[in-house]
Amino acid sequence: MQSKAEQSFQILKERIMDGTYGPGHRLVIDQLVREHGISSVPWRESLRRLEAEGWVEIVPNVGALVRTFDTDAWQQGLSLLARIGGYATALSAPHLSPDDLDTARDLNRRMSEALAAFDPAEFGRLNRAFHELLASRAGDQRLVNMVCSEWARLEVIRKSAYWYAPGRAEASLTEHDELLTLIESEADPDAIETAARKHELRTVEAVTQYEAEVRQDGNGRVHG
C-alpha cells in the first residue's frame, strides 16, 4: 500500500503532466489538504521531492509554483537524456529479446505513419515508448526510472515550449533503424551507447541551429 507521501506525490506529478496544473500554477497546501483528505506533512514532502526533480519551484513569500519550461530547458533535458539513455540502452541491449526488437521496429513504423499523418503528439508518444523500451532491460531499476522520469519531463516541456527542426523527425527514424541493427548484430556496448547518445544530441544540435536561423532571418517560431 502506498504511503500518504507517495500518494500525494503521484497526484501532483500526474496533474502537472496532464496539464491540470499548468506552468506557473500555485500549489496551495491547505487547498490540497481539503481536496484530498491528506494532511499537510505529506504534501510538503512531495513538493520538496518535486522541486528536487525539477517539476516545481518553491519561491520565498510566494509558495510552490509549477515550473515554466522553455526551449533551453528542453535542450538541457535532452542532453541529459542522451547521456543516461545511451548508457541504459547499452546495458539493456544484450537482454532485449527478439520480441522486444520486433516491438521496437513496429513502434518506429508507427512513428513514420504518425509523421505522414501530421500527428506530432502521436509521434512523440511513440518515440518515448521506443526509447524507454530499449532502456528497459538495463538491470538497474534506478537508472531506468531516471530515464523514464526525464522522458516524462520532456513530454511536459514539449506541450508548452517544444519546436522541432524541419527534417529532423525523418532523420531520427533512420537512426532508430540503425540503432536496432547495431543491437541485433550484438555490437560492442560502447558503439551502441555512442549511437544512442549521438542520436539524441543530433536533435539538440538541429534545434539549436534552427533556432539560430529563425532569429537571423526574423521569422516566427514554428511549433511542433
Image (cartoon, grey):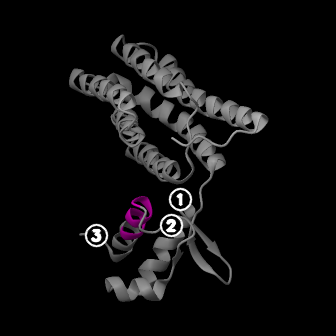
Residue 87 at x, y percent in the picture: 49, 31
Q: CA distance from mark 2 to mark 1?
A: 6 Å
Q: Would residue 156 appear left or right of 130 to someone viewing this image?
A: right
Residue 28 at x, y percent in the picture: 50, 83
Residue 192 at x, y percent in the picture: 47, 20
- Disc 3 marks a residue whose amino acid type is Gln
Q: Which residue is mark 1?
A: 53
In magenta, the rendered stretch is 11-18
Q: Are marks 1 and 3 in contact (CB under 8 Å)?
A: no
Element type where label 1 sits in the image: loop
Q: Which mark is residue 2?
A: 3
Q: Which residue is mark 2?
A: 49
Q: Nearer the viewer, residue 199 or 144?
A: 199
Nearer the observer: mark 1 or 3; the answer is 1
* Residue that sits furthest to the right in the current view: 216
Name which of mark 2 and mark 3 comes first in the sequence: 3
Q: Are marks 2 and 1 in contact (CB under 8 Å)?
A: yes
Residue 29 at x, y percent in the picture: 47, 84
Q: CA distance from mark 1 to mark 3?
A: 20 Å
Name which of mark 1 and mark 3 comes first in the sequence: 3
